[in-house]
Amino acid sequence: MPSQSRGLRWSIAASLLSSLLFAAGVSGAAPSWREQHDQLVIRLRALKDKEGDFGAAYQPLYHAMIGWYEAWGGRNDSPVDANMVSPEEYASGLADALEHGRNFIAENRGCLFPLMFEKALPGGRVVRCNYWLILPRGFPSEGRRFPLQVGLHGSGWLAHKISFARGKNDDSPMFSVTPIDEAGPWQVDFLNAYLDELESILPVDQDRVYLEGHSLGAMATWEWSLDNPERFAAISPRDGVGEPYRAIRLRNVPAWVIHGGKDDVIYPGYAEEMISAIRATGGTARYSLLPEAPHNVPADFDQASVVTWYLEHTRSHRPPPPDPRDALGLNDAGFSQWVVLTAPAGEYWRSAPVEEPDGVWEVRKDELPLFRKIQDRGLLVDEPIRQVFGPGRSRATLWLEVPPALAPQAASDSSVVHVDARKAARFYFRGTYRDGLAHADLIAPQVAASGRTFSGTVWVTPLSLWQNSPRGIAEYSVELN
């Protein structure tokens, strides 16, 4: 029997709803969108006591669903995509089912359910997102745990509104979730908190958690798995940039990298750098280059094959290798101590001078011909493109080292430049290239005190996926006289 307090809440809600309906009837007009929204909020608030009516497996899902419309569905009245129902239609259907004792989730298996997540991180920052959830076949099943697939969207979905979407995913072998980031780029502390929440409210098999992402989401896939390889059984980044110098962290995490052959936003060369680096550490990296695909993965891409491949892998319980980033020696100000070393001789392809190279996108058109020097010969890119700044530093050139496999051809290639071994002062810096070059000027007196002077030429090797940004990390080698 319902308690007196529950009955009182229902009475209050019914009175408020009657008042709203009466007001709409007196005016003789259909309720406005705002009135419809407010009515639905009242109905859903009154249904919070019904979260647990269908058992413990459903309770946390209804808890995250009932509050979704108030927090997210009514944020604006712009239409949702064609494959989704309006937030109002969804909220009305959910409320109607619960009011009549029907299990809305069980009635709509195979659909995408919008849920909400909110949590305060240890540092005090409150993170919020709404997300889609697809349930696996067989859910719920007493004592059974299911795999989980997390998909991270690209920048085209930032602040995108979602709603309930009818679908035919009722044969999914795993939970599938798509969190919606509203600001970008993805933050690893938020992602870890989000995964913690999923693993607490869903019967997730923590040995079978799979991560994938596209574009900005692919960059987050690389970054999150490099930071926390112990959380994932396998990953699949698509059309993104990684951090090859940290690839050893993924020695125990298989990766299926997918990239469009005609991607003119992020060139396939960046994917190939990660593939080459992972394989060099003894890790497993599968590569699918889609020859005719642009930056977006085609709608007919065979995702089912990736899911099958995911399920062939379980999480490794071997400790991940140490993080090479920790060995850079960056202090709280974001730079390391400088050391004098001998930069080895090498053979390079070099671009024409690039004016004012303020960012990776400004030099993008000059990167492609260098990548193709290797790709057109049937090899994968395995070295980063460096920026070399001359005296004055208003111009730079891009340099790509010739792979050893192509060394015999380099002797007759007039576009190849030989660089002799030379002394250099090397340091690591977190920040933009301009700030890094300014730091080189700051340490010039220290270098001079050691009996050496700068020649004016600086080689910058990007290390992090956030190239030439305040978060970016790069190696600076300042040639010495």
Image (cartoon, rainbow, N blue to C red):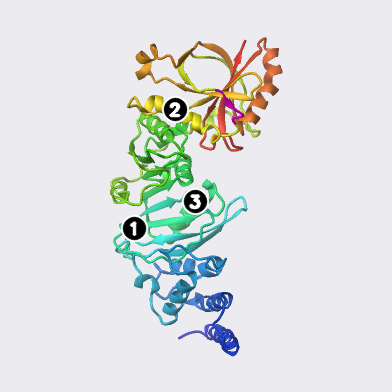
Q: Quadrant of residue 28?
A: bottom right
Give the amino acid type for the residue marked by disc 3 in the picture: Gly
- Assess disc 1: are there few (<14), some (14-19) or many (≥20) residues with their C-alpha within 10 Å of its C-alpha: some
> What secondary structure do most residues of the magenta stretch adopt?
loop
Residue at left offset 49%, top offset 27%:
385
The residue mark sitting in front, 3 or 1, is 3
Q: Where is residue 430 in the image (x, y as percent from the top left)?
A: 60, 33
Q: Distance between the residues labelled 3 and 2?
A: 27 Å
The magenta segment is 353-357
Taking the image as shown, residue 423 lies to the left or right of residue 323, namely right
Residue at left offset 35%, top offset 52%:
299
- Specify the quadrant that holds the N terminus: bottom left
Which of the two labelled residues, at mark 1 and mark 2, occupies the earlier sequence position? 1
Q: Which numbered dot is residue 369?
A: 2
Q: Is 147 located above or below residue 430 in the figure?
A: below
For residue 321, say whether it is visible.
Answer: no
Taking the image as shown, residue 166 lies to the left or right of residue 192, namely left
Give the amino acid type for the residue marked by disc 1 in the picture: Arg
Q: In which quarter of the image is residue 142?
A: bottom left
Give the amino acid type for the residue marked by disc 2 in the picture: Pro
Q: Which numbered dot is residue 156?
A: 3
- Assess disc 3: are there few (<14), some (14-19) or many (≥20) residues with their C-alpha within 10 Å of its C-alpha: few
Residue at left offset 38%, top offset 48%:
210
Q: Which numbered dot is residue 145?
A: 1
Q: Where is residue 300 in the image (x, y as percent from the top left)?
A: 32, 51
Which of the two labelled residues, at mark 3 and mark 1, occupies the earlier sequence position? 1
Which of the two labelled residues, at mark 3 and mark 2, occupies the earlier sequence position? 3
Q: Nearer the viewer, residue 394 or 167?
A: 394
